[in-house]
Image (spheres, rainbow, N blue to C red):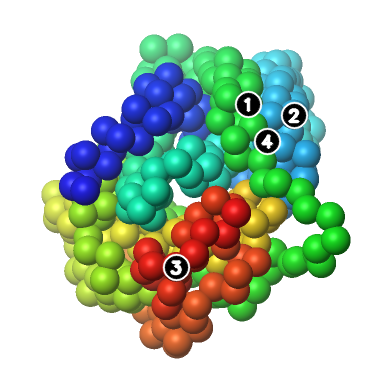
Amino acid sequence: MSPIASYRHLLRLAGPLYVVIAFVGRLPLAMSQMGALLLVSGTTGSYAAGGLAAGALAVANALCSPVAAVLSDRIGQRPVVLVQSVLGGLGLLALVVLAHRDASGGVLAATAGLSGAFLPQIGPLARVRWRPITRNSGARQPRLVEAAFSYEGAADEATFVLGPALLGLLVLVADPGAGLVVAAVLLVVFGCAFAVHPTAELARAPRRTGQPRVRVLSATLVVLMLAQGLIGAFFGSVQTGTSVLATSVGHAGIAGLVHAVLGVGSVAAGLAIAGVPERFGFPLRMLVAAGGLLVLSLPLLAVDSLRSLVLVVLVLGFVVAPYMISNFTMGERSAPVAKVGTAMTLLAAATGLGYAVGSALAGRLADDHGHTAAFAVTVSAAAGALLLSLASQRLLRRPAAPHHLPFGTVQPSSEVSGSTAGVVHA
């Protein structure tokens, strides 16, 4: 089945409305961190206060979203995402109100952190739904799920391009507060719609009595979390280096647009990866993509203009999505049946924490040595990703244990990479 045919079939199975809901529902998370930074910095006159608020929101989300995922696996996504969407939206609105009432930086940071704690991770939860959505597809299911994960990777990249772009437009025509108000409205409307969609019930794993409890953390998942932490550091340092270079040449306002170019290539590669042959397994895809990250990031150390940076970042984007899609797919396939949502969210949380670390480290180095030092963090993260991929190939190629296979799927006969021969694990 060709990638286009796979995407068409997925669209028929889930329905266009679900695809729209799940996509738009991610935008608030993509808008909130930068929105908090701009709002608090503008109202307090302090970039430190703005950075503290944005960091509190990001860290709180990274720490609390796995807890929400555990609850989703236990009681279902519907009640958890409903509560998150309403409380997260109210938290963003409260942040806007308090900022315009001249609240202190500490109060604003605490409010931002509380908001971040409730912002739902729609992307990981959407990934969980595709296997049950395609469960009646017979022998085509493995390729359909692979295509679905390719789409999800591209959708994540697209939202982190469109989210900041939408925020920037609202800042230009109104103010940063308007951006967070729109994010709050989108969260309440589309987050709740995602929660009540019928696919939420499909994603609930059947509970069996008399079976031993299984843990979500495994050696494989820990490796994949480290891999996602490194790609998060990669993102954070690229954004910091881009901002430093743009500011130094007198065009600070277009830093976000330059960084968005990274997502263009990533979205294209994410959609195209569904056409990669099955024999080219996911551990090997991860390794090749990690090598591409290192090779294609090296020119960042030589860029000295926005024009050259745009060209390097555009090409670099083509290996980002394949790396992340491979990680998430292996994480989903290695997770226990009742813990898939938790595993997906842990990977997303690791990305967020890596982003915070990479951004902070790159910023500290850039203060003394400029944008090249920030991009050195990017290259180091890529090198770490390659070394981790090389060291973990044997582990990632091990067959998944039967209790780790998601319900209603075909048990792979060889490795995590995706052979379709096997028996149904119902």
**Alpha carbons under labels 2 and 3: distance apart:** 35 Å
Q: Between disc 1 and disc 4, whose residue precedes?
A: 4
Q: Between disc 4 and disc 3, whose residue precedes?
A: 4
Residue 242 visible in the shown view: no
Q: SS at mark 3?
A: loop
**Alpha carbons under labels 1 and 4: distance apart:** 7 Å
The residue tagged 4 is 77
Residue 85 visible in the shown view: yes
Q: Residue at x 78, y 53 (%)?
A: 208
Query: Tags 2 and 3 in contact by the CB under 8 Å rule?
Result: no
Question: Which image quarter: residue 188?
Answer: top right
Amino acid type at mark 3: Gly
Amino acid type at mark 4: Gln
Q: Residue at x 63, y 26 (%)?
A: 195
The foreground one among 330 and 142 is: 142
The residue tagged 3 is 422
Q: Position of residue 7 (x, y in %)?
A: 28, 38
Q: SS at mark 2?
A: helix
Query: Tags 1 and 4 in contact by the CB under 8 Å rule?
Result: yes
**Alpha carbons under labels 1 and 2: distance apart:** 7 Å
Amino acid type at mark 1: Ala
- Front: mark 3 or 1: 3
Q: Position of residue 130 (x, y in %)?
A: 47, 42
Query: Tags 4 and 3 in contact by the CB under 8 Å rule?
Result: no
Q: Position of residue 362 (x, y in %)?
A: 46, 63
The residue tagged 1 is 195
